[in-house]
Image: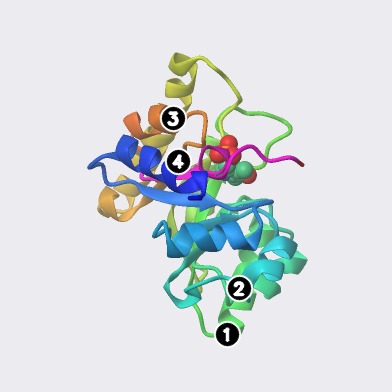
């Protein structure tokens, strides 16, 4: 029987439609066999893991690994950067200078320029990672002194809500924050990534200008932690 994830994948893709939005399949807690079905039968090429340990456990078994875009999307401890620096295309969850410094150091060691997103705590929640919007300009300035780190855009996890209007407010703020800070650098907004939208809110996020949605449970089914 066909894995239900292939049906889910079609549904998500039809909702993306002809928008210029990348689907990142969030594979935390998903067994390797099912991730590989998504890759080989579903054509998934972007995958996101939250935890370094889990990524390392799965890494060698991933199908078509040379074709994959592997992203780290969860909180990253500085002492773990060295384990993933040669494996991930994008680190989406950068939110401190200590982490920037460590990425710079480890990327320089292997002669890589590491792409990163800055995570923004757009709802100002104590429990969540991310910098405040006000801190962004200073951090971007700092990044200009880090030759092995390249800023590619922003990521957020808004407060949990069923209210689409409230969610839209957060997503719109993110879009504005990106536009404001890219303009300053006289660069093209289309070159940047706005990573927002998860299983419950990716349509709202896309309507607000998301360019990358991170979908786990709507693709692979509910996680049982
Ligand atoms: C788990 C996770 C997701 C996906 O969540 P779902 O609601 O299952 O789609 C997206 N982004 C981050 C950072 C996550 O930790």
Mark 2 or mark 4, whichever is nearer to me = 4
- First in sequence, mark 4 or 1: give its number: 4
Q: Is residue 44 left or right of residue 75?
A: left
Determine the residue positioned at 63% across, 71% down.
59
Query: Which residue position holds label 3?
Result: 171
Determine the residue positioned at 37% across, 43% down.
10
Foreground of the two, 1 or 87 = 1
Foreground of the two, 223 or 78 = 223
What is the distance, in whole Å, between disc 3 and disc 2 at their CAs? 29 Å
What is the distance, in whole Å, between disc 4 and disc 1 at their CAs? 38 Å
Residue farthest toward the bottom in the current orientation of the protein: 110
Foreground of the two, 218 or 7 = 7
Q: Is residue 131 left or right of residue 208?
A: right
Secondary structure beneath label 1: loop
What is the distance, in whole Å, between disc 2 and disc 1 at their CAs? 8 Å
Label disc, if present, on residue 70 of the rendered structure: none
Secondary structure beneath label 4: helix
Label disc, if present, on residue 8 of the rendered structure: 4
Q: How many marks?
A: 4
Q: Are marks 3 and 1 in contact (CB under 8 Å)?
A: no
Mark 4 or mark 1, whichever is nearer to me = 4
Query: Which residue position holds label 1?
Result: 110
Determine the residue positioned at 34% across, 48% down.
182
Please give the range of residues in magenta. 211-224
Q: Are marks 2 and 1 in contact (CB under 8 Å)?
A: yes
């Amino acid at each position: 029987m066909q894995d239900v994830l292939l049906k889910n994948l079609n549904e998500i893709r039809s909702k993306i439609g002809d928008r210029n939005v990348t689907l990142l399949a969030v594979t935390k807690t998903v067994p390797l066999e099912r991730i590989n079905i998504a890759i080989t039968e579903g054509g998934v090429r972007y995958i996101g893991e939250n935890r370094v340990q889990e990524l390392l456990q799965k890494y060698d078994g991933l199908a078509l690994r040379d074709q994959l875009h592997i992203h780290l999307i969860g909180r990253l401890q500085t002492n773990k950067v060295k384990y993933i620096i040669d494996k991930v295309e994008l680190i989406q969850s950068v939110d401190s200078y200590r982490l920037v410094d460590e990425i710079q150091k480890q990327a320089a060691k292997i002669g890589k320029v590491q792409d990163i997103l800055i995570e923004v705590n757009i709802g100002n929640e104590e429990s969540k990672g991310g910098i405040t919007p006000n801190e962004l300009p200073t951090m971007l300035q700092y990044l200009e002194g880090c030759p092995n780190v390249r800023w590619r855009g922003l990521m957020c996890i808004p407060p949990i809500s069923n209210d689409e209007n409230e969610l839209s407010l957060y997503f719109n703020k993110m879009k504005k924050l990106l536009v404001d800070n890219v303009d300053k650098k006289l660069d093209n907004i289309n070159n940047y990534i706005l990573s927002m939208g998860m299983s419950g809110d990716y349509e709202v996020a896309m309507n607000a200008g998301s360019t990358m949605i991170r979908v786990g449970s709507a693709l692979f089914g509910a996680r049982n932690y």
